[in-house]
Image (cartoon, helix red, strand yellow):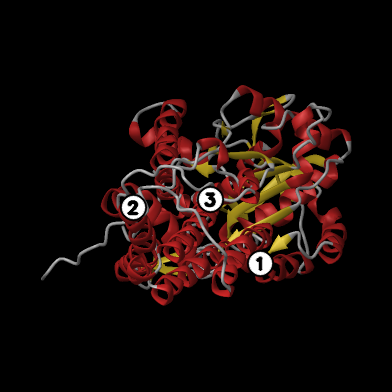
């Protein structure tokens, strides 16, 4: 009997449909997609969820301004996020929309659980609200008449339902204390702990001044506050409210939420409090990544200082953008998107390092080893050292993947690439062709086996290019996971004529 694969559930936040996708959207989903791809390569049973958040006052206002219904508006914008998935080849298993009926039922079921447990009551909300952030703010958070995010706020007074968030302050602090890995990186955990220690007030969880939202059960004059509507998407995708649903029982305890640091409060405070109050299990971990700046300036839609992912992919390529975003940023910290840094990474890490390694090794084998994977002879200590480095690399990458250290995953793979290039220069197969064909074949085999290890693991990061490299090594489609690395590369297999996988970027002369 085949052992059951260990489950792994990875999610992005559902993206708010107030505007088309931007580079930050792409970054979050690339990160989650990379982890999902790696875990599948590593033999895990993966579920990967993304989607769109489609309710709220901001959507209603935007639709009104365009003279269309909110549903027409969200249908249009949601398609742009599907196009982003197609652009990068994201491997999400599901795409959830909060306007879908099964999600509405799930959110309402969570609400009713909270009602049954005495966690929701009706009162009047008086306070500051940011339509752009779809968030409530306390008086002490308002700076110069604006929210801490810099957005405009308005004073709101309306009948509302409230969640007894204040009752969960101590339990949340216990959660953070007893599970220090629940929120990462540590700076974000400290931020959340500080916010909770400052005192929690009950949370307004309904609005009655507009209609575009999920109706509150038994009170159609109210719609759910957009975050209470949105957060349950992670469990509605797994079959909730059926807590005995196979996917819910199997995947929810393994859930990893990838999100931007700007929404850590909603995920790190409100979400676990709602789940605990409803008597439901918590996700395994939240990881909040940093923001991107553009040439040193904060990216802002209001100033037009944005990066269109469709444009940069058209110019540089999808794998190139994936690699740059994953490698350039320490995952969890802010990073800068500059054209010079992007071109440098493409030319240095991709074209020169991995691209040139593959091209010169496989071209040489194609030309001077009968167009086959050569048959090796006895391995030297240098050969064994490189082969061991390549063989140990997947475990190191696995450790980093388990910590969502995406930049370190890249570093481990490219450390092997760098060592392989140094090995080529030291062993000089072109010279061995004249002095020792058997040794030449051994060197080429060691390099081909090293490249196979690199390409199989790198499928998580640069899937298209890695696939082409494996094609050039004549590795069959069913032998491209990490488990397949346990069996050595087979000699005597014909390889096709190699083609370059990463062209250099030539700077335009001014």
Sort mark 2 into few (<14), some (14-19) or many (20+) by Cα contacts within 10 Å: some
Cα distance in 3D space between marks 3 and 2: 15 Å
| Disc 2 secondary structure class | loop
Picture quarter with the C terminus: bottom left
Depth check, front residue: 114 or 288: 288
**Residue 491 spot, x, y in % from top left:** 50, 48
Depth check, front residue: 240 or 205: 240
Cα distance in 3D space between marks 2 and 1: 35 Å
Cα distance in 3D space between marks 1 and 3: 28 Å
Residue that mark 2 sits on: 501
Picture quarter with the N terminus: top right
Residue drawn at x 76%, y 64% as measured from the top left: 196
Based on the displayed image, in which of its 4 quarters is residue 80 positioned?
Answer: top left
Sort mark 3 into few (<14), some (14-19) or many (20+) by Cα contacts within 10 Å: many
Residue drawn at x 34%, y 33% as measured from the top left: 66
Q: Vertically, is 188 above or below 217?
A: below
**Residue 45 located left or right of residue 433:** right
Of pointers 1 and 3, the one earlier in the residue sequence = 1
Residue that mark 3 sits on: 456
**Residue 423 located left or right of residue 126:** left
**Residue 20 spot, x, y in % from top left:** 39, 43
| Disc 3 secondary structure class | helix
């Amino acid at each position: 009997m085949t052992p059951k694969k260990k489950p792994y559930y990875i999610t992005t936040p559902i993206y708010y449909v107030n505007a088309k996708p931007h580079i930050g959207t792409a970054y979050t989903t690339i990160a989650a997609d990379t982890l999902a791809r790696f875990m599948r390569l590593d033999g895990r049973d993966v579920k990967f969820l993304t989607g769109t958040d489609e309710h709220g006052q901001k959507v209603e206002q935007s639709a009104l301004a365009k003279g269309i219904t909110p549903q027409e508006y969200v249908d249009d914008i949601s398609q742009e996020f599907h196009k982003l998935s197609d652009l990068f080849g994201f491997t999400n298993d599901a795409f959830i929309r909060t306007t879908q009926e099964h999600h509405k039922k799930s959110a309402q079921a969570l609400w009713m659980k909270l009602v049954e447990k005495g966690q929701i009551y009706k009162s009047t909300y008086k306070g500051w609200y940011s339509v752009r952030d779809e968030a409530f703010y306390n008086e002490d958070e308002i700076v110069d008449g604006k929210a801490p995010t810099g957005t405009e706020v308005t004073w709101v007074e309306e009948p509302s339902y409230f969640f007894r968030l204040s009752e969960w302050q101590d339990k949340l602090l216990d959660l953070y204390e007893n599970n220090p890995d629940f929120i990462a990186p540590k700076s974000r955990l400290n931020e959340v702990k500080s916010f909770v220690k400052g005192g929690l007030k009950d949370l307004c969880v309904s609005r009655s001044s507009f209609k575009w939202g999920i109706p509150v059960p038994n009170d159609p004059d109210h719609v759910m506050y957009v975050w209470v509507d949105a957060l349950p998407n992670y469990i509605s995708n797994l079959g909730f409210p059926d807590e005995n649903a196979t996917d819910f029982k199997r995947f929810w305890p393994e859930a990893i939420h990838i999100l931007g640091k700007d929404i850590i409060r909603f995920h790190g405070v409100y979400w676990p409090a709602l789940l605990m109050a409803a008597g439901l299990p918590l996700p395994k971990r939240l990881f909040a990544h940093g923001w991107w700046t553009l040439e040193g300036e904060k990216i802002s839609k209001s100033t037009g200082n944005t990066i269109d992912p469709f444009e940069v992919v058209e110019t540089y390529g999808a794998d190139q953008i994936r690699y740059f975003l994953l490698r350039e940023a320490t995952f969890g910290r802010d990073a800068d998107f500059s054209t010079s840094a992007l071109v440098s990474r493409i030319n240095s890490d991709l074209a020169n390092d991995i691209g040139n390694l593959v091209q010169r090794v496989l071209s040489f084998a194609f030309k001077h080893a009968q167009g086959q994977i050569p048959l090796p002879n006895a391995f030297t200590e240098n050969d064994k050292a490189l082969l061991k480095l390549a063989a140990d690399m997947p475990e190191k990458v696995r450790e980093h993947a388990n910590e969502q250290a995406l930049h370190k995953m890249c570093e481990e793979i490219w450390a092997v690439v760098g060592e392989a290039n140094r090995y080529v220069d030291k062993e000089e197969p072109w010279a061995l062709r004249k002095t020792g064909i058997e040794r030449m074949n051994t060197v080429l085999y060691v390099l081909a086996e090293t490249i196979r290890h690199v390409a199989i693991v790198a499928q998580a990061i640069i899937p298209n290019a890695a696939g082409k490299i494996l094609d050039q090594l004549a590795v069959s489609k069913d032998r491209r996971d990490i488990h397949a690395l346990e069996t050595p590369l087979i000699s005597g297999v014909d390889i096709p004529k190699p083609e370059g996988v990463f062209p250099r970027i030539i700077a335009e002369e001014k």
